[in-house]
Structures are given as C-alpha cells and as structure tokens.
C-alpha cells in the first residue's frame, strides 16, 4: 500500500507542477513590457556623457532583452544592456530610444531627448578669432557676445 500511495503522491506532484507552469488563463495574449527611459543628464556641453536606464515592468514576464538606438538614426543595436553609459561627442539634439522585448516576443519602446550643446569659447583669443564678434564700442570683459545679423 505504501508503494501505491507514493506513486499517487508523485502523480499529484506532477499534475500540480504542470498546473503551476501553465499560463494564468488559457487564451490570453502576452502583454508587452512597459518601459521608461531614464537619462541623466539630458542637457549639457559636448562631449557629454549620459547614463541611460530602461525601467521595465511586465505583468507576465521576468526576462527581457534590450536594444538601444542612441544616435536617432532609427536603427536599434547601438547597445544591449538595461543600463548603459554613452558619450555624445557632437553638439545636436538626439533621440535616445530603447526597445525592450520580453521572453514571449512582445515589445515596448520609449524615447528620451538628449540636447548636446556646443562648448563656448574658452579664451579671449577665441572670442576674437573664432567667429565671435564685438558690437560697436562694447569692450570684452571676459565674456563673449555673439552677434547675430538679421
């Protein structure tokens, strides 16, 4: 009798394990992950190093893959980690995007705008010779003023 009880208990365990591994309700579709790009800083002077992170949640998945488009060219694959560090070398406005894929193939995306500014002149010589102009009788007192002609 003990042998039958053990076999029955083993079968019950297998059935319980299968029930636990089955989806919560048959026929439901896989929900896409929710993702938010967190970036710091989002504005600065070139070269600008930015920490980017993909905050991810999903009600029916725990495993994710990450694909980043860091230069805004629409091609994902610049990086593949949840958290990355990237240095923008050239001034401009960039859209950093991440695409997160869960273990069942559903995807979620988010973007963050990154503003990379031009470094200003670093010396009086650059103010005079680097495209910066004085205006009338203005005397340079350590700061440059750019003249925009309309």
Image (cartoon, grey):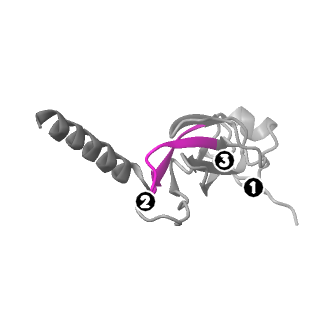
- Residue at left offset 61%, top offset 50%: 105
74 and 14: which is toward the camera: 14
Earlier sequence position, callout 3 versus callout 1: 3
Q: Are marks 2 and 3 in contact (CB under 8 Å)?
A: no
Q: Residues within 10 Å of mark 1 (few under 14, many from 20)?
A: few
In the image, which residues are magenta?
48-67
Q: Which residue is mark 1?
A: 137
Q: Is residue 65 above or below residue 136?
A: above
Q: Which mark is residue 117?
A: 3
Dominant secondary structure of the magenta stretch? strand
Task: Calculate the distance from the C-alpha at mark 3 to the C-alpha at mark 1.
Answer: 29 Å
- Residue at left offset 47%, top offset 52%: 56
> Residue 61 placed where, x, y %?
46, 51
> Residue 136 placed where, x, y %?
79, 57
Q: Is residue 25 above or below residue 50?
A: below
Q: Which mark is residue 59?
A: 2
Which corner quadrant of the image does residue 69 belong to?
Answer: top right
Q: Is residue 29 above or below residue 129?
A: below
Nearer to us: label 2 or label 3:
2
Q: Secondary structure at mark 1?
A: loop
Residue found at the very far right of the displayed protein: 150
79 and 52: which is toward the camera: 79
Q: Residues within 10 Å of mark 2 (few under 14, many from 20)?
A: few
Task: Calculate the distance from the C-alpha at mark 2 to the C-alpha at mark 3.
Answer: 39 Å
Q: Is residue 42 left or right of residue 57?
A: right
Earlier sequence position, callout 2 versus callout 3: 2
Earlier sequence position, callout 2 versus callout 1: 2
- Which quadrant of the rendered structure holds the C terminus? bottom right
Q: Are marks 2 and 1 in contact (CB under 8 Å)?
A: no
59 and 71: which is toward the camera: 59
60 drawn magenta: yes
């Amino acid at each position: 009798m003990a042998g039958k009880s053990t076999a029955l208990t083993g079968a019950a365990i297998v059935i319980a394990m299968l029930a636990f591994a089955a989806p919560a309700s048959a026929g439901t579709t896989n929900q896409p992950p929710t993702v938010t790009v967190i970036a710091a800083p989002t504005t600065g002077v070139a070269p600008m190093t930015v920490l980017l992170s993909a905050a991810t949640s999903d009600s029916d998945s725990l495993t994710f893959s990450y694909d980043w488009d860091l230069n805004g060219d629409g091609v994902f694959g610049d990086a593949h980690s949840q958290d990355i560090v990237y240095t923008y070398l050239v001034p401009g406005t960039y859209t950093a995007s991440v695409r997160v894929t869960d273990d069942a193939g559903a995807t979620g995306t988010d973007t963050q705008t990154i503003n990379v500014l031009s470094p200003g002149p670093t010396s009086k010589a650059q103010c005079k010779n680097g495209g910066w102009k004085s205006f009338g009788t203005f005397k340079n007192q350590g700061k440059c003023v750019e003249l925009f002609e309309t």
